[in-house]
Amino acid sequence: MLFICYPNCSTCRKAQKWLDEHGVAYTVRDIKVENPTEAELRDYFTRSGLPLKRFFNTSGLAYKALTLKDKLPSMSEDEQLALLSTDGMLVKRPLLVTEAFVLVGFKEPEWEAWLLGQ
């Protein structure tokens, strides 16, 4: 299981604490140091079943600086994935990547359902 996060993010710290408290084994990857590649993002997007917009950190400074709220609707999927792969701060975090599923962001009930079957 791969836990892609930004260590300075409070939501990521909360998610990591949750994983630890529930005894879930994982490998950590700092998204700022090693941003997911375009191919990885395409795979995560496909396997997640979520709209691509969910992969964008819409509250982040980079998203706002690039005025992506206005630009995303006219961009193709390929263009969006290419853009996401350029800067880890554009990507919604944390990402939890397993063989069976990909979770984007931390919502405790969702993580419980997927990881603990509750």
Image (cartoon, helix red, strand yellow):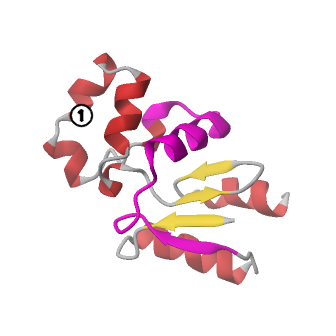
Residue 84 drawn above or below residue 35: above
Residue, disc 1 = 68
Q: 65 left or right of 8?
A: left
Q: Position of residue 84 (x, y in %)?
A: 36, 43
**Most foreground residue, 42 or 22:** 42
Seen as rendered, the residue at the extreme top is: 74
Q: Position of residue 106 (x, y in %)?
A: 55, 59
Residue 112 drawn above or below residue 8: above
- The quadrant of the image that shows the N terminus is bottom right
Q: 104 left or right of 32?
A: right
Which residues are drawn in magenta? 26-53
**Total marks in image:** 1
- The quadrant of the image that shows the C terminus is bottom right
Residue at 30% x, 48% y is 86
Figure quadrant of residue 70: top left
Residue at 36% x, 69% y is 33
- The type of residue carrying mark 1 is Leu
Q: 69 left or right of 40?
A: left
Q: Residues within 10 Å of mark 1 (few under 14, many from 20)?
A: some
Q: Position of residue 77 (x, y in %)?
A: 43, 24
Q: Is residue 41 magenta?
A: yes
Q: Secondary structure at mark 1?
A: helix
Residue at 32% x, 49% y is 90
Q: Is residue 51 magenta?
A: yes
Q: 112 left or right of 5?
A: right
Seen as rendered, the residue at the extreme right is: 117
Residue at 61% x, 59% y is 96
